[in-house]
């Protein structure tokens, strides 16, 4: 089993994300993560999909995605030639005596405390998946109440192969 990160440039139309996720569900493929957002050109949306499978399945996924009418461009974001980031929000149960410990760990990971309540706080951490996992593991001494993760967003390094539509 391999993991592949696909970046799609698609028409910004209603139902495009549904059509893409429907392709995966109809064929029984799993989506590890999916992120989508409008580009600098509001006519287009950039979608990053992380999928697992053997080489044949991953090749089939790419071929099927290319067939969709809304898909303008698709490429693999190879780890050595791309930048990946993920956003993670983590709500941790803490009282006043434990709060500083969580804040110290967050500081090491360049995390931000974005909400403080009497019995909890919310930390925002961005980075690659291994950084997020390491941060979560260091919080194992605390009670994690909730986690919200965006999944990977990524871009290819450099200005080569940038797609423009007129």
Image (tube, rainbow, N blue to C red):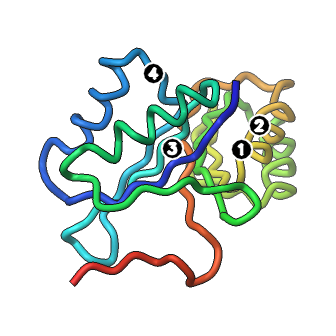
Marked residue nearer the N-terminal end (4 or 2): 4
* Label of residue 133 in the image: 2
**Cβ atoms at labels 1 and 3 below 8 Å apart:** no
Quadrant of the frame with the C terminus: bottom left
| Mark 1 vs mark 3, CA separation in Å | 11 Å
Which residue: 66% across, 64% down?
Answer: 82
Element at label 3: loop
Relative to 23, residue 63 above or below? below
Badge 1 crowding class, 10 Å Cα cut-off, few under 14, some 14 to 19, many 20 or more, is some
- On screen, residue 129 versus residue 147, left or right, reads right
Residue 56 occupies which quadrant of the picture? top right
| Mark 3 vs mark 2, CA separation in Å | 13 Å
| Front position in the image: 94 or 28 | 28
- On screen, residue 110 versus residue 3, left or right, reads right
Marked residue nearer the N-terminal end (1 or 3): 1
Q: Which residue is mark 1?
A: 129
Residue 94 occupies which quadrant of the picture? top right
**Cβ atoms at labels 3 and 2 below 8 Å apart:** no
* Label of residue 150 in the image: 3
Q: Position of residue 143 (x, y in %)?
A: 73, 22
Q: Which residue is mark 4?
A: 29
| Mark 4 vs mark 2, CA separation in Å | 24 Å
Q: Position of residue 93 (x, y in %)?
A: 67, 28
Q: Position of residue 110 (x, y in %)?
A: 77, 61
């Amino acid at each position: 089993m391999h993991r592949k990160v696909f970046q799609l440039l698609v028409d910004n139309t209603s139902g495009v994300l549904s059509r893409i996720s429907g392709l995966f569900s109809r064929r029984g493929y799993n989506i590890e993560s999916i992120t989508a957002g409008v580009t600098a050109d509001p006519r287009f949306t950039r979608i990053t999909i992380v999928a697992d499978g053997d080489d044949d399945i991953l090749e089939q996924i790419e071929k099927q995605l290319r067939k969709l009418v809304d898909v303008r461009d698709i490429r693999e974001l190879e780890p050595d030639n791309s930048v990946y980031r993920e956003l993670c929000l983590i709500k941790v149960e803490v009282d006043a005596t434990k709060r500083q410990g969580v804040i110290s760990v967050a500081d090491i990971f360049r995390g931000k405390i974005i909400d403080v309540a009497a019995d909890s706080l919310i930390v925002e951490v961005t980075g690659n998946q291994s950084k997020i996992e390491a941060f979560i593991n260091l919080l194992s001494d605390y009670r994690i109440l909730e986690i919200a993760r965006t999944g990977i967003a990524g871009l290819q390094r450099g200005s080569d192969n940038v797609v423009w539509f007129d």
